[in-house]
C-alpha cells in the first residue's frame, strides 16, 4: 500500500467518526530537492512520496500509530521534520554519556543522533518521534522519559499497515473530534 491509498483509507475512518481529515498541499519538488541538499542524502522514496502527497497534516491529527502503542502521531511537514532533526542534533552532545535503562536494540546505530535519521512524525511536541533511518531503511522512535531510541518496524510500508490496523481496530483511541 502506498501513502496515497493509506491516506484515502485513513480519511474514510475519520469520516466514519465524523471528524475532518486535513492534509497540507504536497511538498514541491524544489522543496524536496532543497531538503535533500541540506540533509546531504536523498530522502527514501517511500517517505519522499508521502511528502509528495501531503506536506504534513493538521496538528493533533493522528496520522500514524506506533505498533502496540495507543499513541497517534502527527505527520510533520518537511520543514518541521528538518527542524526536529536539527533539534536532535543540537541536543545530542548533552546525551554523550547517557545510559539508557534498557540495552538498545542491535538494529539501531549507537548515539543520540545520526546524520541519516530523519523524523517525520511526532506526538506531544516532540516527546515522541517516529524517525526514518535512511541507513537501515527502517523506522525507529525516540521516546522521552525515560529517554530512549527504540526500534519500531522494518520499513515505511510496514508502518503504514500497522498504523491502519491500529486505527481500524480502535478508532476512538486515535481519532478525536475537534
Image (spheres, rainbow, N blue to C red):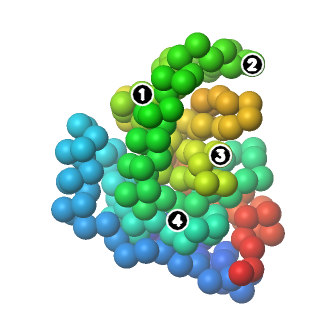
| Alpha carbon distance from label 1 to label 4 | 28 Å
- Give 171 or 93, whichever is nearer the viewer: 93
4 or 3: tag closer to the N-terminus: 4
The crowd level at tag 1 (other Cα within 10 Å; few <14, some 14-19, many 20+) is some
**Tags 4 and 3 touching, CB below 8 Å:** no
Foreground residue among 142 and 43: 142
N-terminal label among 2 and 3: 2
Q: Which residue is mark 1?
A: 114
Say if mark 4 contacts mark 2, CB within 8 Å: no
Residue name at image x 64 percent, y 45 percent = 128
> Closer to the N terminus: mark 3 or mark 1?
1
Q: SS for tag 3?
A: loop
Q: In the image, what residue occupies the spot 41% across and 41% down?
A: 86
Q: Which mark is residue 6?
A: 4
* Residue 49, image x, y percentages: 35, 58
**Which tag, 1 or 4, sits closer to the chain's start?**
4
Quarter of image, res 171: bottom right
Label 1: which secondary element: loop
Q: Residues within 10 Å of mark 4 (few under 14, many from 20)?
A: some
Which residue in the protein does label 2 denote?
A: 101
Q: Which residue is mark 3?
A: 127
Q: Position of residue 2 (x, y in %)?
A: 44, 60
**Residue neighbourhood size for the residue with mark 2, other residues' Cα within 10 Å, grouped as few (<14), some (14–19), many (≥20):** few
Asked if residue 2 shows in the view, the reply is no
Residue at (56, 45) in percent of width and height: 130
Q: How many residues crowd mark 3 within 10 Å: few (<14), some (14–19), many (20+)? A: few
Q: Which quadrant: the C terminus?
A: bottom right
Q: Quadrant of residue 116?
A: top left
Q: Nearer the viewer, residue 76 or 160?
A: 76
The image position of residue 65, as x and y in percent, is 66, 54
Spatial CA span between label 2 and label 3: 17 Å
Amino acid at each position: 500500500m502506498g501513502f496515497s491509498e493509506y491516506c484515502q483509507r485513513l480519511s474514510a475512518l475519520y469520516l466514519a467518526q465524523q471528524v475532518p481529515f486535513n492534509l497540507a498541499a504536497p511538498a514541491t519538488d524544489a522543496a524536496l530537492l532543497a531538503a535533500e541538499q541540506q540533509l546531504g542524502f536523498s530522502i527514501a522514496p517511500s517517505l519522499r512520496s508521502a511528502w509528495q502527497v501531503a506536506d504534513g497534516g493538521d496538528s493533533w491529527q493522528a496520522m500514524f500509530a506506533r505498533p502496540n502503542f495507543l499513541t497517534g502521531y502527527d505527520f510533520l511537514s518537511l520543514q518541521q521534520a528538518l527542524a526536529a532533526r536539527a533539534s536532535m542534533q543540537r541536543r545530542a552532545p548533552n546525551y554523550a554519556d547517557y545510559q539508557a535503562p534498557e540495552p538498545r536494540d542491535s538494529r539501531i546505530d549507537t548515539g543520540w543522533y545520526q546524520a541519516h535519521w530523519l523524523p517525520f512524525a511526532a506526538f506531544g511536541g516532540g516527546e515522541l518521534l517516529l524517525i526514518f533511518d535512511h541507513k537501515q531503511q527502517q523506522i525507529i522512535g525516540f521516546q522521552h522519559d525515560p529517554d530512549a531510541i527504540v526500534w519500531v518496524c522494518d520499513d515505511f510500508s510496514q508502518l503504514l499497515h500497522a498504523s491502519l490496523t491500529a486505527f481500524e481496530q480502535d478508532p476512538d483511541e486515535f481519532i478525536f473530534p475537534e
